[in-house]
Image: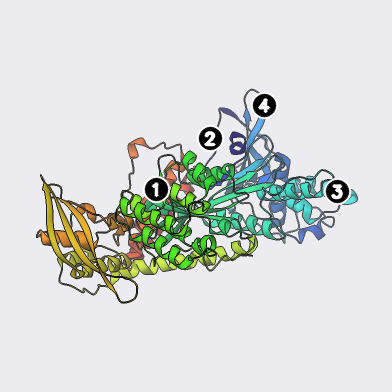
Amino acid sequence: MMKNLKQMEAVCLNSDPVFDDCEEYEDEEDCSVEEHDDGVHEKDSKKESPQPTIGLEFGSFDEAYDFYNRYGKEQGFGIRVSNSWFRSKRKERYRAKLSCSSAGFKKKSGANHPRPETRTGCPAMLVIKLADSKRWRIVEVELQHNHPVSPEVRRFYKSHKKMILADKKQQESIPITEVHTIKLYRTSIDAACNGLQKIKDKDSRFPVDTSKHLELKEGDANALYNYFCRMKLTNPNFFYLLDLDDQGCLRNVFWADARSRAAFNYFSDAVAIDTTSLRNKYVLPLISFVGVNNHGQPVLLGCGFLGHESVEYFIWMFKSWHTSMLGRHPQVIVTDQSKPLQIAVSKVFPQARHCYCLSYIMQRVPEKLGGLDGYESIKMQLYKAVYDSLKITEFESSWGQMISQHGLKDNKWLQSLYEDREKWVPVYLKDISFMGIIPITENESLNAYFDGYVHKHTSFKEFVDKYDLAMQRKHMKEAMADMESRSLSFELKTNCNFEVKLSKIFTKEIFKKFQAEVEGIYSCFNTRQVNINGPIMTFVVKERVESEGSEVEVKLFEVLYETTQAEIRCICSLFNFKGYLCRHALNVLNYNGVEEIPSQYILPRWDKDYKRKFPVDSGLCHIDVNNPVELYNILHKHVMQVVEEGVQSEEHYKAVLQEVEALLSRFSLEDNNLVSL
């Protein structure tokens, strides 16, 4: 596994390389302008070079230099190596700054007739760094010049002269093709696709197993490449990782954008790992990490493509996600019933409670049991044991009766379910806080996060094309829920103070669910105290519950109430499953004359202003000012709160925008003053 981890490649805009002790090295070139005929390269110049972006990689320093030189020629400026950093012992260059030829100013000359100053102190540049022993990566970019540049001006710099001479020789032997362009501007994705193609092109007498690689078809690689490049430019906290094998073939991909990484700060307590595409054998091996926001909506915390369903590959994916979230981990993880998943979760997240999703299992009942005699009866008894059992003894009794009555002792699927019962049957999970991430009733189900956007034959390219649309719609839905929760007053259906209090706190959707529990108080009756042990009182609450058809069944619910700490717990454990008190607990509070819900049962995560109120630990005295990742994350948390305030009204929006623009203007003025010194 360590070998695979060494091959993980991370690209994140809020990171910066750590510098070794080095000495600065000047590599100034004479950048005088020369007239030159460009007839040789005119044909190739019609195809523009890609724009320099952070994260682009090259096979050598020369390739990086040629890339920027060609870009400069097309834009109308020359370049030079303005700084280089070398390792002091080996004199090996590991970092360099390529600048516009007008960068800086010439040193003062003591000559009687010095040459006129042609430089302007231009800031345009890019910084490249040796990522490993072979690849160079762009880590800083500035595209703006402080002087006119134009590709229409037919004059060339010395940096271009070298390129033109090389092109003349290349034209005689190897034509310039798209393949060379890909090679020149390759990233890890290109290398991965090329590596897979090389393996496929090898002698068929020595077949190579490609079943553990991502099967990228025509157009898929470019779609991924373009998406990641675009995100690096437009999404300042975008993060991705690629997993390559020894031949350079792509095995796994993971990414998380700024919204996903911010959402993890708020909603990482319970996370579902959505493997719908893997379970259903889709062409697209998509895996998604999903949380629940303060509206009860699913929220994406990261996603990726898995090359093979093995423990090793799942571990890589989980460690990638863990890295993107800066080493933090969820309290609860919910997955399907998969042994490789179980092993991988236990290794990467040993502190988290790992459970199986009930709806995933129950969806397989027709497939696994549909062919058995007495299927309908088996299904009814199975559902009764799983959904209706309030005590472990009830489940054990119902399950045993089903097995013996239908002769299912040798059914391997049911055997495996029973062995894992403590991971998926609700009666065994009452001490876990799920925050609504799993369904607990027959009428509930957990849909795939990208349901409606991914089908059995969706390709990588098609998914990447749809991804932005899917995320935009989901973000819009969340924004609308935010606005409705803050601006609308909710209709009250009872005179109960519980309802009045939480109507001012909870988001609309969570309040509606809680409101149903308040209304349900009136279906409870004959509440009576059956035991007392010091400050702990035990009550039994009867409730009329509709069963199949129109029949009404009376069920008994045991509720414990501790008076000194105002702690209350019902045997149905709705609070742990959903995050708000059930009707039985509310009934007991009301029975004891308690008019206010104890504060520990009003979870801040359901607050309509949760993200605005989310505590930001600035920790200014502990900040490493030389660590841009740490600085970024602290600032990002503060700025997100400002954004949340800014969308509350037009007045807030204008005020925030005015302050932000003033701050940016101030920074710009300070930078200009530094340049002029």
Reading the image, the residue beneath label 1 is: 422
- If you read the primary sequence from the N terminus, does the residue marked by circle 3 or circle 4 appear first? 4
Q: Label 3 vs label 1: CA separation? A: 68 Å
Give percent across and percent down for residue 333.
43, 49
Reading the chain from its start, which is encountered first: label 2 or label 3? 2
Tell me, yes or no, whether the two marked residues, 2 and 1, touch with CB atoms within 8 Å.
no
Q: Are marks 4 and 1 in contact (CB under 8 Å)?
A: no
The residue where tag 3 is placed is 170
Residue 98 location, quadrant: top right
Judged left or right of residue 379, residue 1 is: right
Total numbered badges shown on the rendered structure: 4
Q: Which mark is residue 91?
A: 4
The kind of residue tagged 4 is Lys
Q: CA distance from mark 4 to mark 1?
A: 61 Å
Regarding mark 4 in the picture, which secondary structure is present there? loop
Question: Looking at the image, is mark 2 or mark 1 nearer the viewer?
Answer: 1
Circle 2 crowding by C-alpha within 10 Å: few under 14, some 14–19, many from 20: few
As rendered, which of 293 and 225 lies closer to the eye? 293
Q: Kindly indicate whether the residue at mark 3 contacts the one at mark 2 (C-beta within 8 angstroms).
A: no
Label 2: state its secondary structure: loop
Point out which mark residue 18 bears. 2
Q: Give the mark, 2 or 1, whose residue is nearer the N terminus.
A: 2
Q: Amino acid at mark 1?
A: Glu
Would you say 596 lies left or right of 301 here? Answer: left
Check the image and tell me how it is coloured: rainbow
